[in-house]
Image: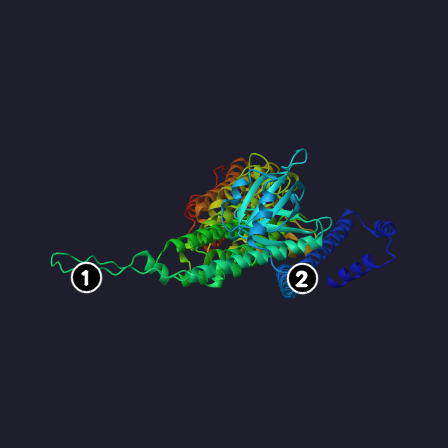
Amino acid sequence: MAEPGNRLRRLLESPNFDPQNYVKHLSQQSDGDRDLQEHRQKIQNLADETAQNLKKNVYKNYRQFIETAKEISYLESEMYQLSHILTEQKSIMESITQALLSTDKDETSKEMQAAFPKETEEVKQRTLTSLLEKVEGGKTIMDTPGRHLVYNGDLVEFDVDNMSPIQKVHAFLMNDCLLIANWLPNRRGPVKYRYNALYDLESFAVVNVKDNPPMKDMFKILMFPDSRIFQAENSKIKKEWLEILDETKKNKVTKDRHKKEEEPPTSPARPEVSTNPFDVDDDDDGGPADAEEKVDLSLEWIQELPEDLDVCIALRDFEGAVDLLDKLKEYLKDQPVTPRVKDLRLKVDQRVRQLTEVLVFELSPDRSLRGGPKATRRAVSQLIRLGQSTKACELFLKNRAAAVQTAIRQLRIEGATLLYIHKLCNIFFTSVLETAKEFETNFAGNTGCYSSFVVWSLSAMGMFVDAFSKQVGPRGAFGSHSCSRILHWTTCPQVFDSKESLSTAAECVKVAKEHCRQLREIGVDLTFTLQSLLVKDVKAALLSYKDVIMEATKHRNSEEMWRRMNLMTPEALAKLKDEMHGCGVSSIEQYTGDGCWVNLSYTVVAFTKQMMSFVEEGLKLYFPELHMVLLESLREIVLVAVQHVDYSLRCEQDPEKKAFIVQNAGFLHDTVLPVVERRFEEGVGRPAKQLQDLRKSTRPVRINPESTTSLV
């Protein structure tokens, strides 16, 4: 058998093979239809073998491909982190360069101050007064004593969202605040500007905006919860604004610190000693004054803390911002709550809310979902450090749910249904496994969040079954919306569709069960959830295929002639024996006759093959909830064959055919039914009582061969 098959394969693989000449030559040498059928069967076997080899080649490196794709995803995440680190390094280098330039400028300014005396405070205030007379609604600004002008100039304000110009403004930088005034283009007279906003120097941070032509010479002012972007006339003026703003803010902080140090400490007055024995001394512990002395908020890092937090948030240095908050929390842990501490905490709380909003946005599903669950670790860990464990858990799981759904949406439908299910299971269960491991890493110390992961796993399993049981039409267990939500309905494989064989559905369910067992290594078992979600579809598939077998059996019964099978060739006989042995019927040799004859009818043999196939596929689909469904289906199928034999015995008059029918009835009763019962009990672990009762009720009885009474 192997040598002719190899010869045929070499012939078909030869480059000079001509199909027309081959068929013509074959038809000339053929003795009849039988030779052509045998040759056709050989070619079909060769085609099936080739298809199997191709399928093996496809699956050979499939796992390696999955691992490679995973590594590429991790590499992409690492490249993103590397890019972020390089950006941070670049910003640090730019800040160092600006610091060096500012040092040179300080030295130059000292030389200029030595050459030219400074303007007096009176001159500066007079200059500010003359300028503010041009600002509508700015007369009250000079009510603050000691306020004078430091720098001023025209700027153009841009929209933060779309970077489009909004209006032309004039900025007045004073020693303790920044005034923004709108330009009035059509106003005549001395008033040229209208009051817009006044910001205290401690309430905002200044951030340089990187040039991106045509957007250049810009800087941003950050104040919670808003920000504004301004454009200078050229790079030189922008540099002056940044340097003078930074210098003025530092001067104000230094001046405030010196002012507090120069204030004499307030001590309670000593009470006069009274000689009256009836006077009672009132104890005075100093109250808030003593507490103010105990809490030292004049440290430089505390004074600059709000601005440093703004800068960290703007530069996306989340770790640095949380480190500063932890440092402040540790410093104020055992300190009394004074009004100054309350003011500081109020400013810090505003930055904490802003930082939380940024971290929440980082975890939102609208952001890029690439990089896997490890890409969310940075934002999640900082939220946990901020005491937002519950929110971090919720956002992390929402992000992972969106990632899983996106991966399922992007799954390409190629090839057969089983291949699609393999891809779907690999994507889904790998994502769940990675999510579980990352969840355990992030929330190891928050055991209260584990229940949220269990709920998320159940919800994700529902999403998986929704994609697994894609149905178009009224039979779908989850409705037609499932397919339309995940992929266009015309491309959806229908696992439980009537066009698909029961073996395909059984293999798909088996693959899903095997992947479910892989989750046990992380302590999650979703097998019961999978079964409960699939039980409706599996039940419908079993009942549908049962009806198909019963209809096919009835159709064969209607054409039954009760003749022995003649398989014509020893090869066909050997193939039948192998098939019956594969079904569990090991006593088929008892029913083979001389040559290639089999002492069974074609209908009984075909029924046996189909029955045993249904048993095997049904056991693959078996759930405890489907025990009675499968058992009753087997009983109904067996009953169709039994009733046909009963009817044939009642109607048949020929003694030889009646004896042949009895022989087939004995084969069904003594061979097929015990095999079905044994296989069912092995697969389920429970006896098939209904099948046992059916076999007992159909026990053959001895009667007169001439009688028309049934033997069954």
Q: Amino acid at mark 1?
A: Val
* 229 over 74 or under it: above or below: above
Disc on res. 61: 2
As helix, strand or loop, the secondary structure at mark 1 comes to: loop
SS of the residue under disc 2: loop
**Mark number, residue 454:** none
Where is residue 188? Give x, y as percent.
67, 33
Q: Residue at x 73, y 52 (%)?
A: 44
Across and down, in percent, residue 298 comes to 44, 61
Residue 646 lies left or right of residue 13; in this view the side is: left
Q: How is the image coloured?
A: rainbow
Q: Quadrant of the N terminus?
A: bottom right
Looking at the image, which is closer to me, 517 or 605? 517
Q: Quadrant of residue 270?
A: bottom left
The answer to whether residue 469 is seen in the rendering is yes
Q: CA distance from mark 1 to mark 2?
A: 98 Å
From the image, tell me which residue sits under label 1: 273
